Image (cartoon, rainbow, N blue to C red):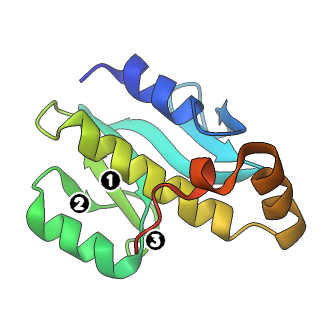
Amino acid sequence: MDILIIKDYLLSKPEAVEDYPFDDKTAVFKVQGKMFALLSKYQGRQLLNLKCNPDHAIELRDIFMEIIPAYHMNKRHWNSVILDGDLPMGEIERLVDHSYSLVVKGLKKSIREGLEVRYGKPSLYDGELK
């Protein structure tokens, strides 16, 4: 799996920024200061931690071997995606979209509404579960 393609997709989200608050190898992706993804390496495997609706998180873990409870995070709300090339890129993008949407929905109303005005609701909430 090409990590640069995944980073490009993460940074394509409106106002997404990449930060390294923990060390120079663990990339944290944020919108308005709130994390929606974390890219790291653990036990030789590249992991992408993404926020997820708790019920959906369990479903995903049951369906995909590459999706596990998030390493070093709240396992109810976060999944780790093992980036070994087996999970289709479309599914990874869908999971990124979902994580980003959840974080944007949790922002302060004034900040969220500002994003909605600047970028439109579809670009912010395209990963929202119906």
Marks 2 and 1 close (CB-CB < 8 Å): yes
Q: Is residue 96 left or right of residue 18?
A: left
Q: Residue at x 16, y 49 (%)?
A: 66
Which class describes the residues within 10 Å of circle 1: few (<14), some (14-19), or many (20+)? many
Q: Is residue 58 left or right of residue 74?
A: left
**Which residue position holds label 2?**
68
From where the camera sits, is residue 86 visible? yes
Q: Camera-side residue: 22 or 124?
A: 124
Above or below residue 110? Residue 49 is above
Q: Quadrant of residue 69?
A: bottom left
From where the camera sits, is residue 82 visible? no
Mark 3 and mark 2: Cα distance apart in space: 12 Å
**Of the image marks 3 and 1, the number of the one nearer the N terminus:** 3
Q: Amino acid at mark 3?
A: Asn
Q: Residue at x 76, y 50 (%)?
A: 33
Which class describes the residues within 10 Å of circle 2: few (<14), some (14-19), or many (20+)? many
**Which residue position holds label 3?**
74
- Numbered-mark total: 3
Q: Position of residue 22 (x, y in %)?
A: 62, 40
Q: Residue at x 45, y 57 (%)?
A: 127
